[in-house]
Image (cartoon, helix red, strand yellow):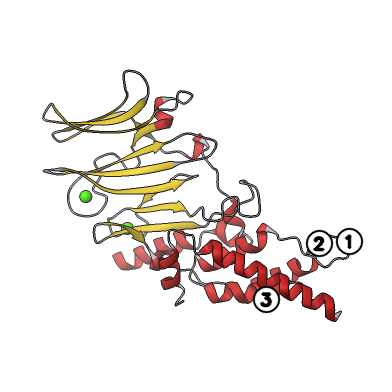
Amino acid sequence: MRKFLLAVFLIIVIVSPVNAQRRPGEALFDHPGFKESDSVPATNKVTIGDYLCEVKESAGKKDICVIFYKSGKRIRSDCGESNGLLSTESMMAILMSPPAGTDLNGDDIPEIIVRYFSGGAHCCMEYRIYSLGKRLELIDTLQGLYSYFKFRDVDGDGRYEAIGRDWTFGYWNTSFAGSPAPEIILQWGDGRYRFANDLMKKPADEKKLQKLAKEYREKALFTDESRQSLHWEAEWWAVMLELIYTGNGDLAWKFCDWFWPVSNQKSVAKTYLADKKKFLAEFKKQLEKSPYWADLKKMNGWR
Ligand SMILES: [Ca+2]
Ligand SMILES: [Ca+2]
C-alpha cells in the first residue's frame, strides 16, 4: 500500500498538469531570478540542541557572518562580504523550509542551510550546509548562481533533494530574461549532493517535438535580406537543453535536424548546413562548460 501511495505521489509530482500543458522548453524560461516571492521562509537565529546559530553583520558592516556557539562558547564564524544596499536577511539567512535542524541526508544528525547572496545585478546565490553533530561540520556548498535552490524530498525516501537550475546558458546569445536555465535535482550520496540522474529523467514526446520543429522551421528568421543567414532563437536551445537535462540527449540533436531550415536552392542549402554546424559546435562548447557536464554525459549515455 505504501509503495502504491508513493507511486501515485511520484506520478502527481513528475507529471503535473502544469507541465503537461507547457510547450517543450518553455519551463526553462520560467526562472524568477531573485524575486522575493520565490524565496523560502528564513531566520537569523536558531537553537538546535547545544548549538546556537546566528547571522549578524560585523561591527563595521563590511562582512556578514553566520556565527556558531556550542554550549554558550563561540566555536566558528563564516563570513561573506556585506552588500550595504540589501537587508541582512536578503544577504544571509538560515533557511526554515525545511525547518532548521532537519536531518537532510538521513544520517540522524541535524543540519542547517545558510543561504548567502553576494549581491550584484544577478549574482550569486550560495548555500552552505552545516551538520550539527558532535562536531560542527560544513558538509557541502551549493552554487545557485542566479537563482534559488529549494530543498524537498522529491522521491519520498526521507532525504532532501536540492532543486536548482544550471545557468551555463545564462546570457549565451541572448539576454538574461531570455536565457533558458534547465532545472537540476541533486541528491545526497557519498558525502555530498550529486546529480540525481534517476530523478531528472523524463520521457519525451517525439510527435509533439516534430510538430514544434515544423513550426520553428516555418517561422525561422534571417539576419539579412538575402535570407541566407539565420537568426538563432533561444527557443531552439531551450528545447534541446530540456531534452538533454531529462536524459533524451540524442533526441536533442534529432530535434535540431528537424527544425533547422532547408532550401531547394543548392547554394542556400549549403549555407544553412554550414550555419547548423557552427551552431551545434558552439552549443556543444557551451554545454561542456556546465559544472554538471560529466553527469550529463553519463545520464545521456555519451562518451
Ligand atoms: Ca543529517
Ligand atoms: Ca529524497
Cβ–Cβ below 8 Å for labels 2 and 3? no
How would you rate the neighbour count of disc 3 (Cα within 10 Å): few for under 14, some for 14-19, many for 20 or more?
A: some
> Residues under labels 3 and 1: Cα distance?
24 Å
Q: Earlier in the sequence, mark 3 or mark 1?
A: 1
Q: CA distance from mark 2 to mark 3?
A: 18 Å
In front: 146, or 83?
Answer: 83
Q: Which mark is residue 225?
A: 1
Q: Amino acid at mark 1?
A: Glu
Q: Quarter of the image containing the C terminus?
A: bottom left
Which residue is painted at 46% across and 62% down in the image? 14
Residue 76 lies, in percent from the top left, at 20, 33
* Foreground pick, 157 / 25: 25
- Relative depth, front residue between 299 and 229: 229
* Image quarter hosting the N terminus: bottom left
Q: Kindly identify which numbered label has been placed on residue 248.
A: none
In the image, 270: left or right of 9? right
Is there a contact, CB below 8 Å, between mark 2 and mark 1?
A: yes
Name the residue carrying label 3. Answer: 257
Residue at image position (43%, 47%) is 144
| Residue to which mark 2 is pinned | 222
Q: Residue at x 18, y 54 (%)?
A: 107
Tell whether label 1 touches label 3 (CB within 8 Å).
no
Amino acid on which disc 3 is placed: Asp
Residue 26 spot, x, y in % from top left:
62, 57
Q: Is residue 62 left or right of residue 233?
A: left
